[in-house]
Image: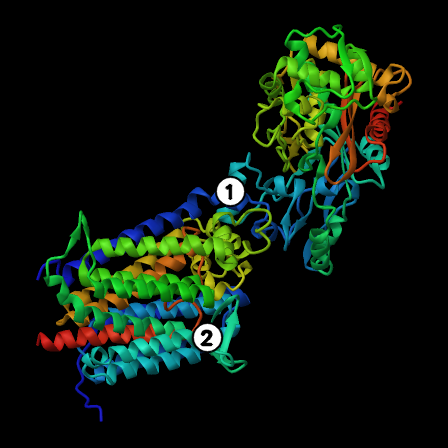
Amino acid sequence: MIRLRPVARLAELRLLVWVAAFSLAGYAVVVAAAAGKFSWAQLLVPVIVLGLFAALHAFLVAVGFRGDQLLLPLALGLTGLGFVLVERLAPNLLIKQLSWLVLASGAFVAVILIPRDLSALARYKYTWALLGMALLVSPLLPVVGREINGARIWVGITGVMQFEPWELVKLALVVFFAAYLDEYREILSAPPRRFGPIPLPPLPYLLPIVLMWVVAMLVMVFEKDLGATLLFFGIFLAMLYLATGEPFYTVIGLLLLVAGGVVAYHVFGHVAARVDVWLAPFASDLRFDTGYQLTQGLFSLGNAGLFGAGLGNGMPERIPVVWSDFVFDAFTEEVGFAGALALLALYLAFVYRGMLVALRAPTTFLQLLAGGLSFIIAFQTLVIVGGNAKLIPLTGITLPFVAYGGSSLVTNFILCGLLLRVSDITARVRG
Amino acid sequence: MTGRSVAANIRGLTLIIAILFLLTSIGVGYWTFVAASDLNGDPFNPRLIAAVRDRARGRIVDAGNGDLAASFRAGDAYRRRYPDRSLAQVVGYASFKYGASGVEGAYQQALIGQDPSDLLGQWRARYLDERTAPGSIALGIDAKVQQAAFAALAGRRGAVVALDPKTGRILASVSLPNYDPNLLVDPAQQDVAWGQLNGNKDKPLLNRVAQGVYPPGSTFKIITAAAALESGISPDQRIRVDDPFQADKSWGDYFVRSATRAHGDFDMALAFQRSENIYFAKVGLQIGGANLAEYARKFGIGRLPDLDLAAAHGQLSNAGSLDRPTLAADTSYGQGELQVSPVQMALVAAAVANHGIMVQPHYATAVRDPGGGILRTIGGGAGDQVIRPETAARLTQLLVGAVEAPGAFAFGARIPNVHVAGKTGTAENPSGSPHGWFVGFAPAEDPQIAVAVIIENAADGGVDAAPIGGQVIRAFLGK
């Protein structure tokens, strides 16, 4: 049984009032802009969403949770914004997204409750690694695997439900890496052998680098998903850096990634196609074909100006699959560069807060875990915003919390729950 | 423990992330501010068309104020109507789905009442949502010349362009096969039409006048002659022609061939009348590839014409220079690796006609405000002196001879009581039978019209093209 030991979480509560105000106002504007008029009945969905938010807060209060008070309002603020944008861009998906939110909230509660001691995660690290690998290859299985929009990264039953197992793999990977790197970190205490100015990486580091690189490349080849490849390898390199502080490993890793990318460009059509579109989306042979999505996204950005066209007033619906791939451009078109900066600031605040949790965590494992989880949010945001703004090739990575998508919402709520758990443990250890 | 603590690494990673967020923000700012005006004026940006869905777009009219594009009300939105199919690729289309092309695209902002010259109007549209009523775009197209050009080329693949050599105003522009732009603005038919047009290997959407590139064949001899005259070669000097020709044994089994299998002495006049390849190859070798390349560049070969619609730049050669003797010889009579567009060749003729001055070509002549007043005029620059006036005068005589002398190849362009200057060309190409060319201008003593005609895969090459040029000139002069 859960023992109730209520504590006040006033900072969290105050911030959630702002979240509620902004989400409701944004939603009302979008509804009014679309229908030309406004009725209170249309606010049913956002009220349910806010009710769920309030319930999550009440739950943390009730169980006497002592973790960070900023992370949840930041995550829920982004989620609330996500609902405003789903209503704006794909209102027919709203109810589906709402049911995913219920599931995500359940997962969040479970994470707060079940692993009372997170060291269990470290103890079973190879189990997590195996589970991650199994999830990773699951889309390649016959019956359940699905190829959607050219990427084979889905499992599901047609017509019932589809899920991107990749989303959960990210978490399994971070847990495994945190545990593995924690265990082998002591090898650093031996003076590193050097080959001239180059420090020779000890085998326990070198081996997994190569292994991970191979796996990442296999993902790229067989699941045709650049985003997953990038994220997979990015998480690994970031955590290696967190554990060792040795930039040399990161440089080797990046060089391997670039080399793999160059080879892939010349060998695999789907990689070359992505890169060609990135380089010249306006080329006359691409602009109505594979470059259409990106050019329409850039038109959205061009229409943004400082304060945007106003919610409901732009034309982002011209971008194909805007609700999952191009939410950032759509949002920017209607709220302007100022709004885009505010959105990026929210992500940066979340990441900063997550990194602070990592900094204060009592054990190296928890530090690496929280650092890796925060990095996922930062990296996904950078990769998809960079893709939307033609700074890097576009990938299928979603904008965390905001973009439509059930698998990613559930995963991000679990991620947020884990970060909160680490901060709760810290608070208890420190008294 | 050596190495840094995990805490220090967390700080380092956070710093890197913060820097990347900053760079990303700058990148987003680039599109929202720096590139914004390009994006907002892009003819494919659906916002431009959507902005005036519930309003009429500006008219596009020809020189006689006849409608070439006008808006009408269809249900709850306005739609475009294009009465003259012969101008399909020039006027273009403004489709909500497929963007805008031609004049509809190039003058998109003016057509929705946001002409770049009207800054106040642009700001009012953006921030107050008050749009200035759109003006109209006046083209230089002369309806009777246009109809004559269309009728003359009908049933063939190719292009005709006529322009005023003194101002660069385009009087007629036909590109065949063409298409019905009305289909692309009809929501019920546009998808099928778009698919068919893009799948058509004859490329009806292409404006062959400016975007089609072909080897110029013998019409290029005008440039070779201009270079020769200015390099001290006398037009009266006789040069021995013996078919087939090669400069020396290093050419191996490569020869320049004469179209008439000629053996004899040619001066420049006779060489123009009979279009003698070997004469021009020898002249080209004498003045040198670098010299010839320099004149080709002056005449705009391989350079994007400063046109107000999309155009191709073509090429002098694959490498851009003429360093091999065989390439220089082949280029001298218009083969080699040359690629030119009809409007480029029309400009070559126009420069000769206009005392050696090449002017800027333009389809539109003015952007007008809703009341019919001139908002801004298009074109009218001073032009570049590409050859000396004496050279131009001499070339004009030679080109009149190429039309009027007994046995001249370009006889088909003759008009009673008018001296026509012109040159045919028969361009060998890899796609089958040779393309037929004619470029010329008239009247020779005071040129008012310059034309270029190309017929793709013509049966008799330039001989087929010359009469089309003649008919266009006739329609313009009213003879």
Q: Which chain carries label 1?
A: B
Q: In which quarter of the image is the C terminus of chain B?
A: top right
Going by the image, does B444 lie left or right of B9?
right
Name the spot of residue A66 as percent of width and height, x first.
Answer: 17, 77
Q: In this view, does A283 lie above or below B242?
A: below
Lateral position of residue A210 relative to residue B206, left or right: left
Q: Residue placed farthest to the bottom in the image?
A: A1
**Nearer-the-camera pick, B323 or A103:** B323
Q: In the drawing, does residue B284 fall left or right of residue B115?
A: right
Label 2 Cα neighbours within 10 Å, binned few <14 / some 14-19 / many ≥20: many
Between B446 and B161, the one nearer to me in the picture: B161
SS state under label 1: helix
Residue A361 spot, x, y in % from top left? 15, 70
Question: Judging from the image, what secondary structure is the residue with disc 2 in?
Answer: helix
Q: In which quarter of the image is the N terminus of chain B?
A: bottom left
- Give the x, y percent position of residue A399: 39, 64
Reading the image, the residue beneath label 1 is B38
In the picture, residue B359 is in which quadrant?
Answer: top right
Residue in the image at 74% along x and 16% along y: B279
